Image (spheres, rainbow, N blue to C red):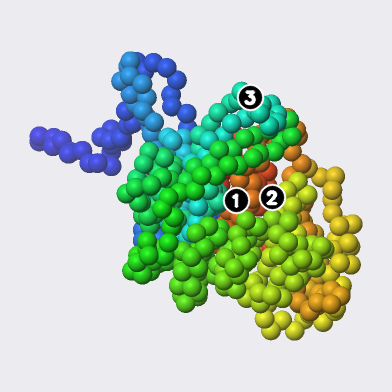
Amino acid sequence: MRATARRPTPSDPATRTTRRRPAPNTNQKGPAPPPFSAAPLPLPPAAFQANFAIAELRPLRSPTYHRRPGRRAATAMPLLLPNPRSPPPSPLRVLSSSAAALGGFLLRSGHRAGARRLHAALAGDNRVVLGCGLVTLDYLATVDAYPRPDDKIRTGELQKSGGGNAGNALTAAARLGLNTRVISKVANDETGGTVLSELKETGIDTSHVIISDGGNTTFVYIIIDKQTKTRTCILTPGDPPMVPSDLPMSSLSAALQDVSLLYLDGYSPEMALAVAKQADQMNIPILVDAEQERTKEELEGLLILASYIVCSGKFPKNWTSIPSLPCALLEILLQYPRAKFVIATLGEKGCMMLERSEAGDDSVVDAADIEAVADSLRLELHKDGIFPTCVASKSLRLSARGQGTVSGRLLIGTAEVIPASELADTTGCGDAFIGAVLHALSTEIPTEKMLPFASQVAGIKCRAIGARAGLPWRSDQRLAKYL
């Protein structure tokens, strides 16, 4: 009887097939590309509003990279693939890691504006901070000492950089991760082109900047005294000036679309007032940078509409004719009842802020003299520390002799202590401070953290020449504890 051979089955060990990974390329020369790693960035819950299912991704094995001998390894992006063996991690952590990885890749590739826009997109945040005001080109000359009359001196260093209050503050806010937009005016000249290019490179929306056919773009000569660490600014105004007729109502409405906060530096007061009135009708909060060089008539209309006021330390005293800074801040909130707070920046001495209590807050019952409260807070300050700090009073009914009463809190903040060897230039410190305040308001950072954060941003800026070169990016580790 003929023996019948059994047909092998797939279950037999002898016939079971095993998939093998391809053998590594032993001819590969040079070190393998380093593994990609990035610390996760915390993102808000709004990130889950994205139009793609990032939350369903799981962490992946690192991909295998191969290259032909003699060729440079291309920069590879990390990928995310499903890993069925691993339990699903926190969706927020996966999303944060993905954003951090791609954002880090863009930063290393030089695409900083793209990295900022990516972070905002992944966060699902379409809100925009709109700034209306001055953009300039700054020529910065560093000298050993400021010249005396009829002196002839030489510069130690000459630099060219974008400037202007609105341009600087929006650049600071954009680097911190905000979507920013600007209304301003430049001429169709080389200077105007340079100004716009720098703003666009930072990621600021310049589609509403007015470009005049003739005239000149605003530019500034800045003399930086290395000996006294001071700067002197000589501004040549742009011509023709920006006026409300430059921006039709349809364009203004488009500029205010999706805007959550309006910033005004007071430059071109007629245009600023027109933008402020339209924003007020749309219930958009307004932050006003109150500078002394504006006339009382020019600033009055803006301050009446202001939700927030930021100014220099000299402004409150000059505006109210009250020598005491705490009492002058109190008078400003009495004059402008819509303002939620007023901040006076004091340079190396820090800042002082008076914050109004929320309407209907019945918990404020204790009364106090604002001067006495300020003296008490000064004793609590940690003046020996290097990094910015802040002390705040409890909510009180604050008053002063001969003045009314405001329910709120008084806060005093310190500035970063910068070694003389690191202090390069104070140009634009106030703008850097305001840019950080814009970020804090947009991301709802508590007031006690907002003041040290803004002071830290301003302190970091001081370590480079010009108003923008030293402005930190969101990824700066010196800002990690605030964000």
Residue at the image position 18 percent from the left and 38 percent from the top = 6
Dot 3: element: loop
Return the x and y of residue 361 as percentages of the image width and height.
71, 81
Q: Of the numbered discs in the image, which one, if any, rests on residue 455? A: 2
Label located before the other in sequence (2 or 3): 3
Marks 3 and 1 sit apart, C-alpha to C-alpha, by 32 Å
Q: Which mark is residue 431?
A: 1
Q: Residue at x 66, y 26 (%)?
A: 151
User: Circles 1 and 2: CB distance less than 8 Å?
Assistant: no
Badge nearest the viewer, 1 or 2: 1
* Residue 394 image point, x, y percent: 80, 70
* Image quadrant occupied by the N terminus: top left
Element at label 2: helix
Residue nearest the observer in this picture, 211 or 199: 211
Q: Is residue 9 visible?
A: yes
**Which residue occupies 86% across, 75% down?**
401
Please, what is the three-letter code of the amino acid marked with disc 1?
Answer: Asp
Residue underneath mark 3: 152
Q: Is residue 443 above or below residue 71?
A: below
Please tell me the numbered disc located at residue 218.
Answer: none
Residue at image position (30%, 20%) is 68
Q: Position of residue 461 (x, y in %)?
A: 62, 41
Q: Does label 3 or label 1 sit earlier along the sequence?
A: 3
Residue 152's quadrant in the figure?
top right
Q: Residues within 10 Å of mark 3 (few under 14, many from 20)?
A: few
Residue type, numbered disc 2: Ser
